[in-house]
Image (tube, coloured by chain):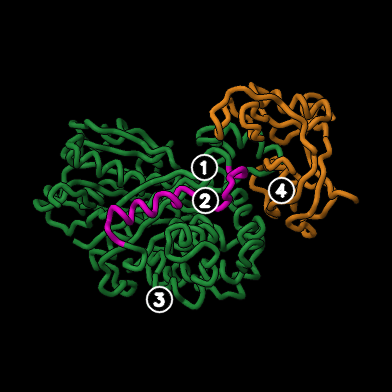
Chain colours: A green, B orange
Amino acid sequence: MANEACIVGIGQTPFCRGEGSGVTELALQLQACTAALDDAGLKARQVDGIMPFPNLGSAEGFAANLGCPNLRFAATINMGGAAPVASLQTAGAAVKAGAADYVLVPAGWNGYSGRRVAQTLNEQVSSIPGGAIARDFYFPYGLTSPAQWYALMARRHMHEFGTTPEQLGAIALAMRKHAQLNPNAVMHGKEMTLEAYLAAPMVTDPYRLFDCCIETDGAAAMIVTTVERARDLPGKAVRILGVASGQPYPADEITNRKDIFMTGLTIAAPQAFKKAGLKPADVDFAQIYDCFTFEVLQQIEESGFCERGEGGAFVEGGRIELGGDLPVNTHGGLLSEAHVLGMGHIVEAVRQLRGECGTRQVADAEVGVVTGWGDFGDGSIAILGRA
Amino acid sequence: MSDNEYKKPLPALEGLTREFYGFCKDGELRFQRCNGCRAWRHVPREMCPECGSMDWGWEPSSGRGKLFTWTVAARPLHAAFADETPYAPAVVELDEGVRLVTEIVDCRPDNLEIDTPVEVVFEEVTPGITLPKFRRSGH
């Protein structure tokens, strides 16, 4: 227990579109780092481990700006949007092993005013595992973007299990509803009906406009240490009860999986629950990486909250809304709060377990799940607990 | 059509990928097949993940299969396809069991149906590159 890892600090910037953040992606992330340090009651010089998001800065650069003269642990998990949650596993292992005392994990970008999220892969495809395969076998046919890659799986799921557009819509609507209770959400004050969801233009069938995450400028950060060190800090620590990451097979090619619905989470989720000694029914809320609506449904299934093929029915009837059996993305998620590469989901999970969520607080939240999803279906999952 | 006019992304003709597209240029769809366990595979790999053999050959595919899944790209997410929408990147499952990202050339995107039987056709998009595409069988 004393050697268990925990999250002791979270921070985030405002989220915006329009004219954008007006600062560099590094400056944006440094603001979030500073907020996380203040939240934890730590000084930058105490940070001796840094885990930057892939392609969004170096540990050396963060250390030089923040003033971390004792940097001794630096790593990046190359799993796209699954990286922040997967970093919880590595950061936790690092502090438990004594490789670092306090590990800072930043993420953030000018996803609206800079490289638009939807366009990022066009320029950076060679940087992801499987990038050369996409270039040689997907791009020539115009299959160039994550929305399109994952739409292939969504279409197949609809064919095999009868999943409907209205069920995908229930996910988009739940996230939008939650955003109305989150003043920091970009979609705060912009309610949406099922009719408006269905009437929105197609982006890549079966994904309509509101099945797709929003593009925003913003950053968030967290700090990981041991429960023992956390006792000397002023804030409420959130315990990492179980965390795991995983890869689909093959991870570098999305169409030739024998099991087309297998993702990294398929192998990660049972491990994380086993480590935590808990089961999906014990979970009070889930912050699920919602790059697109179907990926929420798929992760609900692959995490074991329901059987494969039952995700469509699971998300209906308000079950994933606040007040339902499993509130999902109580902050609004990537679909309605902001796209901060999954770090926003961790920040919200920590706030829920600290009881700081005001009107969107899940009553008596003791155990929460947060997932990450990246590249061709890499997965990560953490089961977090109230201190 | 010359290389100058064709603006869409092209495969990099390197290593095993060069060999795959080399057969396409000759009007042949071939996939790797393991000489150890006889498993077919795509995309090209050095080693058979089923049995560990590095002994393999390029064997001709029947060129026949069925539509496994697709998406209709309604909004261009890549500049080179801005004038193409709506178009439908598709996945075909060949009779050999391997799946290939491709395009169905003789069917409007909104008429596509999973499991439709299809057969390969070849489209020379540049003097150097021929892409395998598919049409509905029997049409």
Closer to us: B87 or A339: B87
Q: Mark 4 points at which residue?
A: B90
Q: Mark 4 lies on which chain?
A: B
Picture layout, residue A213 above or below residue A121: below
Q: Marks 3/1: CA distance?
A: 34 Å
Instruction: Name the disc covering residue A262, or none.
Output: 2
**Image quarter (top left, top right, bottom left or bottom right) of the C terminus of chain A:** bottom left
Assess whether mark 4 and mark 1 are in contact (beta carbons under 8 angstroms).
no
The type of residue carrying mark 2 is Met
Disc 1 on helix, strand or loop? Answer: loop
Residue numbers of the magenta segment: A254-278
Q: Name the residue furthest left.
A: A232
Residue located 10% across and 53% down the image: A231
Residue located 24% across and 38% down the image: A66
Q: Position of residue A341 (x, y in %)?
A: 42, 49
Disc 3 on helix, strand or loop? Answer: loop
Select label 1 or label 4 by which is in front.
1
Closer to us: A329 or B85: A329
